[in-house]
Structure formats: structure tokens, C-alpha cells
Amino acid sequence: APVDGKAEKRQKGAKLHYNAQLRSMCWRLASSLLRTGGKFYEYYLKEKDKYQHRFRDESRLIVPATQLPKKDGKRYEPEYMISAGHVHNMALRKMIKLFLTLLWLSWREGEGLPTREPYPVEYLGHEHPITPEEMCDR
């Protein structure tokens, strides 16, 4: 869960509000899904393209992290810039969230448990949810 608009980080002596092991496993899974190609990779590329267009429409430069300016010896993102790695991670998060949604849906159906419409359909008015069958490569 975000804290002051930013991702929560470990702090010595503070309790985490997320499962660190699961979070780590999700990032490893995401990199594996990218390497294998397939439908999740296509989804990642589509989402990355959306983010790139959004930032360009906002007149923000997308640059490698090495080209970000430094302040007090640390790189930072001014309002008019965003790092390419940041865009990559945003698209990766979207991809892994889709995977987890489809995993939850398939698992519940497999166990014979009730399911509900995905959040984007139920609350955001989307009409065509992505189904697990659509994301299968075979």
C-alpha cells in the first residue's frame, strides 16, 4: 500500500504492511513472464506504450536514469522528466496485477467458489474484461 503516494520501503524496526517474500516473488515472476514472451509480454508492451504516450502528452521527457539530473549526489526526477526504468516498472506492475487477478479468478473457479466481476468492470465501467483464456498462449 502506498505511503504518502510512494511505495513503502523497509525501515529498521518498523512493521511492513505487505508480505515482502510475496512481493519479491511477484517481481521475479514478472521478469520471467517478460523473458518468455507471449500474451503477458504483449500486454506489457501495450501498457508501456500507453504510459509513454501519456508522459509525452504531458510534455515529460523519458530518459535513461543516467541522464537524470543530480541533487546532493543523488539522481532525481524533475517535473518535466521521468526515467525509462520508472516507465518500465509501471508497465511491469500492471502486467503482474493482471496475472494475479487472473490467477485469483481461475483458482476460485477451480475450487468451485463464487467469483465477482473484476474491479475495472464492476467499478470503472469497463465492458470487456480480460479472461484467463485470452491470456493463454496455447
Image (spheres, rainbow, N blue to C red):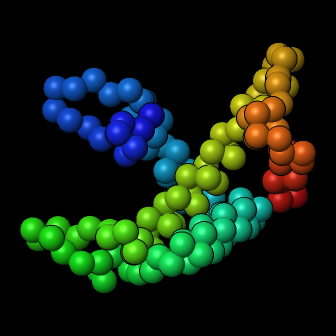
Placement of 83 over or under 123, stated as above or below: below
Labels in figure, total: 0
Residue extending farthest to the left is: 72
Please identify the quarter of the rendering in which residue 67 is found.
Answer: bottom left
Residue 48 visible in image: no
Examine the image and state in which quarter residue 102 appears.
top right
Q: Residue 79 or 98: which is nearer the viewer?
A: 79
Residue sitting at x 20%, y 35%: 11
What residue sits 48% from the left and 43% below the top? Answer: 25
* 17 lies left or right of 50: left
Please indicate whether residue 70 sits to the left or right of residue 65 in the image: left
In percent of width and height, residue 71 lies at: 15, 70
The one of 51 and 60 positioned closer to us in this rendering:
60
Q: Position of residue 122 (x, y in %)?
A: 81, 32
Q: Which residue lies at the image location 59% right of the left edge and 75% below the top edge?
A: 57
Looking at the rendering, which quadrant does residue 108 occupy? top right
Q: Could you tell whether 77 is left or right of 30 in the image? A: left
